[in-house]
Amino acid sequence: MAFCLQIEATRGAARTGKLITPHGEVETPVFMPVGTLASVKGVSQDTLEELGVEILLANTYHLYLRPGVETVQRMGGLHRFMSWDRAILTDSGGFQVFSLNDLRKVSEEGVEFRSHLDGSAHFLSPEKAMEVQIGLGADIIMAFDECTEYPAEGGRSRASMELTLRWAERCKNYFAAYKYEVPWGSSRELSAIGRQERPVAGAQLFFGIVQGGMDRELRRESAERTIDIGFSGYAIGGLSVGEPRALTRDIVESTLEHLPLGQPRYLMGVGTPEEIAQYAQSGVDMMDCVLPTRAARHGLLFTSEGKVSIKQARYAQDESALDPACDCRVCQRYSRAYLRHLYASNELLAQVLNTVHNLHFYLATMRTVRAWIRGGHAD
């Protein structure tokens, strides 16, 4: 598999460096904003660039349903479709299918589910998840996994882990069959069936996912067997599904002990600014979470002085900046009173400005951590 992580400095378990992707280098540890539908809600791509975002996440399940991989392919791939020339990671859709509950049926072959959009029936197998992600053309694609609920009863965690490992093998086999030495967008091949254009998957990085529920021993076994299959990097999945935060941290740290030092480590779907800083210090290289954007839409803002619920009436005449220590363009220009007015008035600008600030805060947190690892100070 491609060598894609260059570690430049370490401090204890933490490390900083560069993740090498077909669309540029990404400084690690990195927080990846979530752009589920090829859009980070409320924020345009030029604003993301101004914020310094080097990689973002999109979702296979949602893009498969709308607009459809065929549409994205006709537009030249996900990067061209959304006018984003930096790195993209696509989640395989396993977590989204897991969240459908009564709308899905899991079997050895894959998952039969009904669309949350219109109720139409679909089937997502490991091979199909790979086909869609290769078609979208993301820089980093993920193996299709099953996410275990919390709490899991009896042998449920073991059975789910074993299924995820079997699916990982199938994903690897499919990916290997369509792996070429040219990057996405530079070449295409004509398939034997119907002479349809098939996007080339050559430079895509392919990550496996460690599962095992809240069982430390299962997590160790899952990590070792996933490594035996062989991937460019390794993700820790199946967390933030209702378990206590202390348990999440315990599982993450115990799993990190079994992941390779020289390859990327990706913690999926976690957490608050304090938590992502702690996980980065524990040796995680990549993280994503919807919290900064979702919280922004509900008026919850992260600051150096703690969380601020801007909807509260006490800010109605507060002339101070949201966060005096923050250099984002929202804090530099607008008062708490104005931000509270926008939210109370249900102005769309409230969601935009709140999201810009929260994303800046998360990204600045990672810059501070990287500087700490290097032994210096953030820019």
Image (spheres, helix red, strand yellow):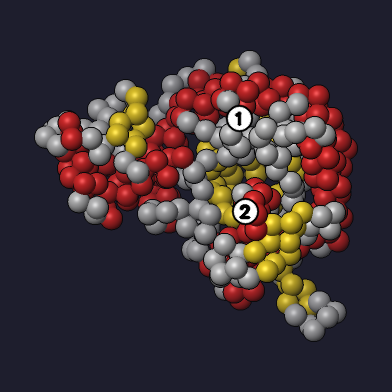
| Residue 270 shows in the view | yes
Q: In the figure, residue 331 lies in which quadrant? A: top left
Q: In the figure, residue 354 lies in which quadrant? A: top left
Q: Which mark is residue 142?
A: none
Q: Nearer the viewer, residue 329 or 334?
A: 334
Residue 128 horizontal/vertical position (percent): 76, 63
- Relative to 280, residue 297 above or below: below
How far, Cα to Cα, is label 2 from label 1?
19 Å
Residue 69 horizontal/vertical position (percent): 64, 69
Q: How many C-alpha atoms fall within 10 Å of the one at disc 1: few (<14), some, or many (≥20)?
A: some
Q: Disc 2 designates what residue?
A: 100
Image quadrant holding the N terminus, namely top right
Asked whether, in this view, residue 200 is left or right of residue 282, the answer is: right
| Residue 172 shows in the view | no
Q: Please say if the residues under marks 2 and 1 sit with CB atoms less than 8 Å apart.
A: no
The amino acid sitting under disc 1 is Glu
Residue at the image position 80 percent from the left and 45 percent from the top: 164
The mark total stands at 2
Q: Disc 1 designates what residue?
A: 243
Residue 243 horizontal/vertical position (percent): 60, 30
